[in-house]
Image (tube, rainbow, N blue to C red):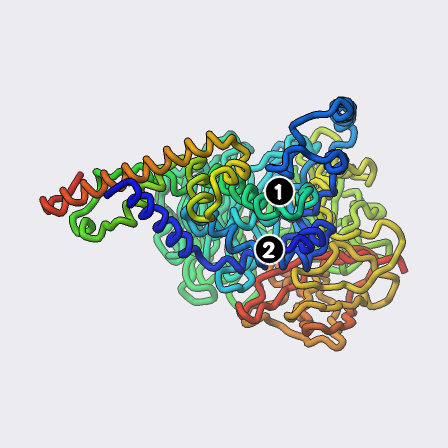
Amino acid sequence: MSEQDTTTTIRSWLRDRADTAPDPMPIVATVMADLDRVPQRAATPWRRLASALGSSRVAQPWLPARRWAPTTILVILALVLLAVAALLLAGTFHRPTPLGGPFAEVRSATWSPDGKRLAFYVFNPITTVNGNGVKQYESPKSLYVMNADGSGVTYLRTSTDASPVPALLWSPDGGDLLLTSTDPAGQDLDVRVVPLDGRSTVDIGRLFDPKWSPVANEVEGVTPNGEVVVVRADGSNRRVVVGAKANDVWWSTDGRLLLVTVGDQGSEDMAIWIVPADGSRAREMRECSGAGGASWSHLANAVVCWRAGTQDLIAVTPDGAPARLTEMDRVGFGQMSPDRSGLVTPNLQPGIAIIHPDDSTVRLTTDPHDAYPAFSADGAFVSFWGNRPEGTGLFVVPSTGGTPKLVGRDATIQWSLASPWQPNPDGPQRFAFIRGRSIITVAADGSDPRAVLPEDAAAAVRGDDPRDEAVDDRIVVLADGPERAVYRIGPNPDAAFTVDNRSDDPWVVGLWDDIGAGSVDCGTATPVSSISGQLASIGSQAPPSRPALDFVPVTCQVAPHSSARIKDVGFVPRGTLEVHLYHVAPALGVGTLSRTIWLEFSPP
Amino acid sequence: MDADLVIRAQGGDREAFERLATTSVGRLHAVAWSILGDAMLAEDATQQALLSIWRDLSSLRDPARFEAWSYRLVVRACYAERRRTPRWMPNLDGLPGLEAVAPDAVALVDERDRLERGFRRLPFDQRAVVVLHNVVDLPIDRVAEILGIPSGTARSRLNRAMQTLRAALAADARSSLLDASSGETVR
């Protein structure tokens, strides 16, 4: 073959090859949807100057001229000096690149055991268009750690699972993070250990509800086959300690034993087993035969079993001896103080109470909406989430009793930090919460608030968030979601707001008020309880280790190009209400996109 | 290219930009596809190039030069994409002409497969020159202008690339003939 022939062959092949490129038109739709994230650069003074001066370099019109006139050189020198000055000043006005885009959210912030660091996720919802021109929605979750003062923000990894609130658990020594996430149906498990010293991530397999040992870098979890597995953080020494049918598994506080419920829940063959974590001989607790379930006692010295179908409780030591049943165990849910001198619980309604081992009780509050109490690291304070006349958000009250003080206004705090208090038993007591898209720490008395992760560091600006007293209760929804992140709602008794859907598809509005006492009035929108078969009630998605409350079960579907006035009748509008908007994509048949906004209610 | 569209898009007119993108995406994507040889990478590069066009359009002084300027951005995006995700690059190690060709595949190895393998051995800067010159059909001086390199450099890159492709074509052709005649697996 001659050189000319081969050249022709090559050229022909190259052109034919180019013709096989996939249809590029969907790319345009993706780009157009992304334009908001890429603001146009204004023409720089240099460009204007270069344009005014003209160019002798016709070949590359976007580049500066090659032949410099003396005046041009002087201008350049002046500009260079200006640039140097600007660089010197840049430190003053430096603004870091946000971790996420305009729809980013901060989730699952968790203190390290020593209280020196915070780990958190940044959800960054994005919209793409697939090869068929159908919009697809993804919400990559990027994991970060930072120091308690907000310095040293370090990126760890990104995942794209669909779980709304992925669990994030620190190892006892603070050296590893255990990430567990599932899709909304709980099907696909992504369980892995992320070492913070730069070592590779360890995939520890499919395990339901994995938990760290309280004392060692070991994890237990239940396989899809019902086996209980214990494995080291580095993936080694993996051992099956229960062969099948396991349900709930709980570590003893010393990390030596596992309390395992085995068998079908509610059936007669359900059994309670005490299983040594080292895989040695397990013991069935026949004292608990016929039990409907079991847990460790709050004092951690006994197993508490309850009879199926009744509320009868018995307490038994791990080796089968009878134990005293305390009032703390009768109440059940709550958090023990660090020194185990009391259990703070919302289960002695109304309000929050502390129960001591001698069964004496101190009532801290009487408001039935108070929930999620937590002891400070030194046990001197109790925080809780409340919806009270003074506002909605985090309150703090001395554990000896007193007047609760609103220190963190945010209706969503209970989803943010499983344990908000900074582990610092001997120092000043501070706690953290997520407000909107920022992480705030504040002293126990509400003083010294610090935005350790400011909103503009977490997320790109979306719209003009209300900075003044202007009221705007019309949420305009465009094709890619609401046009703003925060809306200020004027005083009204029903937490009413309008959703103006200007897109071509329906959007479902879900209210994350977490009270469960009220009802939603959808107005002219359609009340729905599911989105194409998926449960739409966002409140039903309780994060791990959280009791599900009685959430508002109704969401409202707003038709394309229509608006509806929606009222959250049970919500006392004195704080911030988180609202999720689900896009219903007819082509996909499911509502896979959610955008979050925050409604700030003016005081009545 | 409608210079009016460019001017309007420079002023932030999204409708104008969408029309501009719609009329440009085919040629930009063809370049990206040709250089990268990977559908996902090409899509990402094209998308990034269009976003760069939107972002930096105000820096384009002569709207009539939009087309050349956009080629420059898509080539840059291809370079960036290749640096960011060199995911198929390791496969190239398994593609040299005289190894890893199974006997049943020998019969299927045609001219275009050999060219594909040869093309993938080219450095990226040579690929860009080859594609812009042979696919987009731009004169070599214009290619140099777009890539921001001297004309002589563009010519030498094109020559080296074509030599590599010819050599690969010839070598692979020889190996295919040898393999076909012996009927043995070449390892």
- Report the residue at 44% width, 50% height from top: A207
**Which residue matches tag 1?**
A120
- Amino acid type, residue under disc 1 in the picture: Phe
Provide the chain ID for the residue under circle 1.
A
Estimate how packed mark 1 is, as few (under 14), some (14 to 19) or many (20 or more) residues with alpha carbons within 10 Å.
many
**Whole-Å distance between the Cαs marked 2 and 1?**
38 Å
Residue B17 placement: quadrant: bottom right
Residue A501 placement: quadrant: bottom right
Q: Is residue A8 visible?
A: yes
- Which residue is the extreme one toward the left? B182
- Report the residue at 29% width, 48% height from top: B113
Q: Which mark is residue B21?
A: 2
Q: Indicate the quadrant containing the N terminus of chain A: top left, top right, bottom left or bottom right.
A: top left
Mark in the foreground, 2 or 1: 2
Estimate how packed mark 2 is, as few (under 14), some (14 to 19) or many (20 or more) residues with alpha carbons within 10 Å.
many
* Secondary structure at numbered mark 2: helix
Q: Position of residue A284 (x, y in %)?
A: 40, 53
* Frontmost residue, A271 versus A385: A385
Q: Is residue A275 visible?
A: no
Q: Position of residue A206 (x, y in %)?
A: 42, 51
